Image (tube, rainbow, N blue to C red):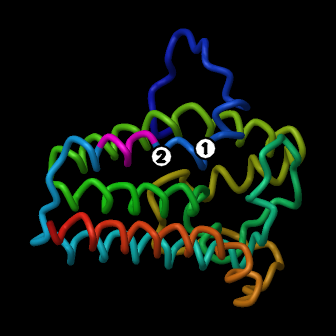
Amino acid sequence: MFWPEWPSMRINPSTWFAWRGWVPVPLLAAQLLLASPQTAHWGLFLGLVGAGEILRLWAAGFIGRRYRTRDSTVGALVTSGPYAYVRNPLYLGNTLQWLGLGAFSGLLWALVWGVCAGLLYRVIVPWEEGQLRAAWPKEFEQWSQQVHGWWPKRRGGECSHERFRFSQSLRSERSTLLVWLAVIVLFLIWGSD
């Protein structure tokens, strides 16, 4: 596992899972209020956000809208595409994007965003994988032995039979792409002061 086990977790992971899309909002507001834009970091910001979104689009093209759920509904176990290399490509993409957000205001903010992503995913990934393990015990066990949760492997594990669908990817990521467009416009305005 990426994180060591904590002796006591009084946090309800399913609640954090349901609200995971809203977690960055207060942190972004704090960054906008407290930090200064460093427009010299535009390239790093756009590079990390772009790399994260490419990974998310690739993953969404295989898993579809199933990942947009807010409850514990479990669909098929997808092990194709990026899921053949890393078990959490969507969260890895988010982490890259969050680091990019922070990098726009400097290394300290990138570190803050990275720690927040790590804490969030430390709570929800074990819960989410528990849901998958319960629904697909044999398949999940085999997949988790072949594919690491966070560090991509050079060669992928055995794949399920899903195919990449670009239209599905764009539909699934539509709201995320619009949010990033709004954030980029916001940063352009913020950085021009």
In the rendered image, residue 190, in percent from the top left (x then y), is placed at 24, 64
In the rendered view, tell whether residue 177 sits above or below residue 86. below
Q: Which mark is residue 173?
A: none
Q: Amino acid at mark 1?
A: Arg
- Name the one closer to the observer, 17 or 152: 17
Task: Give neighbour class at mark 1: few <14, some 14-19, many 20+ (Cα, 10 Å).
Answer: some
Residue at 58 percent across and 68 percent down: it is 176
Which quadrant: the C terminus? bottom left
Q: Amino acid at mark 2?
A: Val
Tell which residue pokes out farthest to the bottom in this image: 166
Residue at 52 percent across and 34 percent down: it is 122
Q: Is residue 183 left or right of residue 61?
A: left
In the rendered image, residue 14, in percent from the top left (x then y), is placed at 73, 31
Task: Give neighbour class at mark 2: few <14, some 14-19, many 20+ (Cα, 10 Å).
Answer: few
Q: Closer to the observer: label 1 or label 2?
A: 2
- Name the one closer to the observer, 145 or 54: 54
- Name the one closer to the observer, 58 or 103: 103
Quadrant hosting residue 33: top left
- Name the one closer to the observer, 91 or 97: 97
In the rendered image, residue 16, in percent from the top left (x then y), is placed at 64, 33
Number of numbered discs? 2
Q: Is residue 114 left or right of residue 75?
A: left
Dot 2: element: helix
In the rendered view, tell whether residue 46 sits above or below residue 190. below
The residue where tag 2 is placed is 25
The residue where tag 1 is placed is 20
Query: Magenta stretch?
Result: 26-30
Quadrant hosting residue 100: bottom left
In the rendered image, residue 7, in percent from the top left (x then y), is placed at 52, 10
Q: Give the CA distance from mark 1 to mark 2.
A: 10 Å
